[in-house]
Image: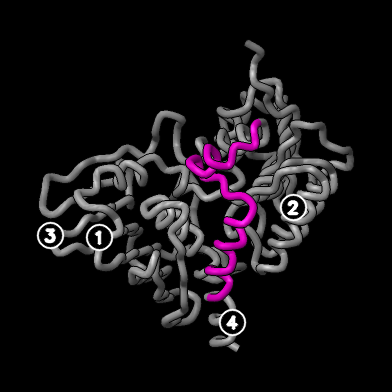
Amino acid sequence: MAAARMPDRCVIAGGGRWARVVLRELLGVLPPSTPITVVSPSAADVMKELLTKDAALYANAARIEVRRDLPAGRAGDMGIAVVVNKPTQHHPTAMALLARGYHVLVEKPFTAELDHARDLLASAEIGGRVVAAGLVFLAAEYVHEFRRRLPFAPAEASAVEIDWEDPPVEMRYGEAKRISSDVSLGLEVLPHAWSALKAIFGAGAPIEFALAAATGKSRMSVAGNVGGMNVRIRIDAAATARRRLIALRNAAGDAVLDFTGDPAVAMFAGAAPVHLPIAGREGRPMARMLRGFIDYVRRRDGDAAWQRGIVTGPAILEQMEAICGVEHAYRALKA
């Protein structure tokens, strides 16, 4: 049997903390023969310095190129790119990469505007390339395991509550993490909420979001529904500590997933807590998502891609419609 084709070239567009996380994960996903180009107009010098100081990156420095602008040459059939720069730059960056022949994975939020998402999908179809949204909670095996262990069907819950809290600064993956000033809390968090709800309730479950309240740039409440069931999302970016919680309310007892740390903890109606490791069979969710994207570029199997956090086609627009409605209401509130 012939070996599966792997990318012959990879571009990472972005130089911030999350771009560095993606780079480290890609080093474990891609074969050593695949060169990686990191593109960042503002952080190229930081990335170059990191290559000399970080042991894992230094060991792979020969295959990593850092530059300020996108490569001019056209990609081959298996050239891939991952866009992890500022959300306001996702649309122009992904368009430029598609024009160069790359298959493009865009980190959340896919774009800041629904029309920009439509542009990317149309450009990819015209060029015969893949453009996909990467949503790590669809790729998180612990979320799917939580669903499998539920003592009742998700549709039997009476309501769903999601709490998402972050301190202004925290250490994550060895670096300081700060909430981006370039994007609202809705664009930052709601893609995660949407993907977690889809993982639990199924790909066909319709999801709607609406802004309930917002306090400055640090707090937001979102009301919504999944398949007609009430959803409440509370977002706080000025909390004292990190907290991630999904609760499905049920008359017989609640089901709660606390994925604040590793392992995640599932609690079902007073039973003993169940520990669910963050890393699964294919590594951490980000690694699984990247593997899923490469596999989708090869095989175009949308169902398999979805299970590994890769959202394509109409599902991208479905997600963007839900999220952009909240975003536009937030802008109007702050105008």
Seen from the viewer's position, the closer of residues 36 and 99 is 99
Tag 1, which secondary structure? helix
- Mark 3: secondary structure: loop
Mark 2 near mark 1, Cβ–Cβ under 8 Å?
no
Q: At x 12% / y 59%, what residue is drawn?
A: 252
| Residues in magenta, as a range | 299-325
Report, in whole angstroms, how far the alpha carbon at label 2 lies from the one at label 3.
47 Å
Amino acid type at mark 3: Ala
Residue pictured at 71% horizontal, 26% vertical: 34
The 10 Å Cα crowd at callout 3, few under 14, some 14 to 19, many 20 or more, is: few
Residue where numbered disc 2 is placed: 94
Q: Alpha-carbon distance for marks 4 and 3?
A: 40 Å
Q: Which of marks 3 and 1 is in front?
A: 1
Q: Is the magenta stretch mostly helix, strand or loop?
A: helix
Q: Which mark is residue 331?
A: 4
Instruction: Find disc 3 in the rendering and name its residue.
Output: 252
225 or 89: nearer the viewer: 225
Among numbered discs 2 and 3, the one appearing first in the sequence: 2
| Distance from the alpha carbon under mark 4 to that under mark 2 | 24 Å
Give, as a three-letter code, the residue at label 4.
Arg
> What label does residue 156 carry, if any?
1
Q: Nearer the viewer, mark 4 or mark 3?
A: 3
Q: What residue type is labelled 1?
A: Glu
Q: Residue 7 carries which label?
A: none
* First in residue order: circle 3 vs circle 1: 1
**Residue 15 at what x, y percent from top left?**
66, 49
Alpha-carbon span between mark 4 and mark 1: 35 Å
Residue 290, compared with residue 235, is above or below; it is above
Determine crowd level at label 1: few under 14, some 14-19, many 20+ residues with C-alpha closer than 10 A: few
